[in-house]
Amino acid sequence: MRTKKPRQLYFKLFWTYIAIALFIVCSLIVYFVSAMVGNTLRNRQETAQRIAGEAAALAESDEEAVDYLFGELYRDEQELRDVIAFLNLEPAEYQEYSLDRYSESNSLQYRGIRLFVTKAFEAYPGLERIELLSLGEQKLTTFLPENKVYPYQDGSAVLEQIQDPGSAEAGKLQFVRNILDPDTMTQEGVFIFTFSCARNVANLVDGLDYVDLVITKNDESLVCMSRESRKWENLLNSDAPDRQIPGCDLYKEQTDVYQIYAVLDRKAAAMIPVSAFLAIIGVGLAIFACGVFSINIYIRHLTNRVDVILSGMHQVTTGDLQIRLAVRENGDELDMISGKFNEMCLELDEYIQKSYLAEIEKKNAQLQALQSQINPHFLYNTLEAIRMKAICNGDRDVGKMLYSMSVLFRSQLKDADWITIGQELDYCRQYLELFEYRYNGIFTYEIDCPAELLEKKVIKFILQPIIENYFVHGIRRQDKDNRISLSVRQEAGREGVVFRVNDNGMGMEAALMEQKNRELTENEYRQTQSVGIENVNRRIKAVYGNGYGITLDSIDGGLSVIIWVGTEKSE
């Protein structure tokens, strides 16, 4: 056997545990990176949803400001009358009208269109411009912060724009309010309030590369996008009902006039900071290094204990059975092995001592057996002399009986332990012939064996004790129809051959037969009347194994002894 190299177990266990530790650490790194990516994506999804809400709140705030300003206009009748006059009168006529109204009032400040616009710009810094358009002559006046006014321009283009649902000024939130004459309820003109949204949108997504804002009118005309380079026009041109963009999450908010979309790029949003990724890798490497150090210490301790056991085994091979290994109380499997090793050395030492004494006794027994062979040979020779004397005197039946008996004695003395089935049947026939003379007229027998089985070898004397048991316990001496049959068969699906010894004798009680079969199966030995059957059963199991042996069964009121043995076994 090839000797293992020193420390082979150490390296085998070391690299196995290292591989396991590396797999666990890599799995943990993947898990934590995946968890961080998932948390980052969820947090940024919440951020995108929040940004959409904030943008919608800004748009609603601008719309609420317009509603408030317009409400204030209608609550101040003088300002409203001035606005209507500004829309319907020529510039000179309006100047005369405003001077008359101012002279009639007791106020130091004229409450007209200019005062209304000035207060609006002061109250709402996000208000970029206010436009006043007359419907009659389509004249447009534009008011800007810091009292800048561009009066009486052509307003036809602006009128077309506000009448076209698909038109919108880029980067601007516009709110149109109709001006009605409170007396006639006719529409005299419109106010157009314009707020800048581009700066607010840019501020909301400043530093957030993974999210963009898109603002459209409710008719889906584009108003503002946070980044032109992203080309989120795909959102506006999408035919899908939920307006999804591949690889993106969409969060929508809506006001009375505008729709706000926050578009989240999932790939960009799932990116974690490089520093966080390197921190996870660093922690994983530190854990792996600690694991390698611990594994090395543990395996060295383990292999050192194994080396102690191997050293003890080597000492045993040199003949030293006094070696004893240290065993810890409540130890592990190696301590159990060490304990069993100590027990083995002790028992082996005792066994060697007993075997030495047994060998001496065996030699003495062999000498006695050689001496005792004189008597069987003397008995065999004497029977042969008596047989010849009977034949000479004309008594052939006595001679035949003596011949059968001498053949039996000779087979016991000279034949090998393994014989053919044909020889075994011949011994049985000689034995049956002796009993045929003894029970003349009340006993018959038959033997049935296929010719192809006669040359198969089995251990000898497996049938004679069974037959003898029948003549001792089973024959009905008062009857004249006693019969015993012996058959040999090779059954399909089973190795070996089966002998069946059937008789019509005394039989056996069912309970006793069940107990006897259990004892034969478990190979138990009890001092009973069927000593021959137990003896044969033990011999068969000793030679062929526990799968073979003897079984008893009832047949026609008698007994069937089934003997299953192997064949063709070398001596």
Image: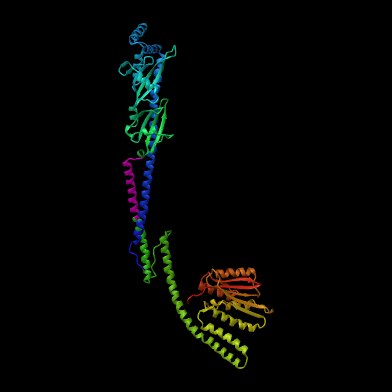
Relative vertical location of residue 414 with respect to residue 240 in this rendering, above or below: below
Magenta residues span: 270-295
The spot of residue 409 in percent (x, y) is 55, 84
Q: Nearer the viewer, residue 182 or 204?
A: 182
- Quick one: quadrant of the N terminus? bottom left
The spot of residue 179 in percent (x, y) is 40, 16
The residue depicted at 36 percent of the width and 56 percent of the height is: 16
The residue depicted at 36 percent of the width and 31 percent of the height is: 213
Whether the magenta-drawn stretch holds residue 280 is answered as: yes
Q: Nearer the viewer, residue 300 or 281?
A: 281
Task: Report the label total.
Answer: 0
Main secondary structure type of the part rendered in magenta: helix
Residue 324 seen from this side: yes
The residue depicted at 43 percent of the width and 69 percent of the height is: 346
The spot of residue 83 in percent (x, y) is 37, 13
Relative vertical location of residue 172 with respect to residue 138 in this rendering, above or below: below
Task: Specify the quadrant of the image occupied by residue 157.
Answer: top left
Left or right: where 512 falls relative to 414: right
Q: Nearer the viewer, residue 471 or 448?
A: 448
Residue 123 seen from this side: no
Whether the magenta-drawn stretch holds residue 125 is answered as: no
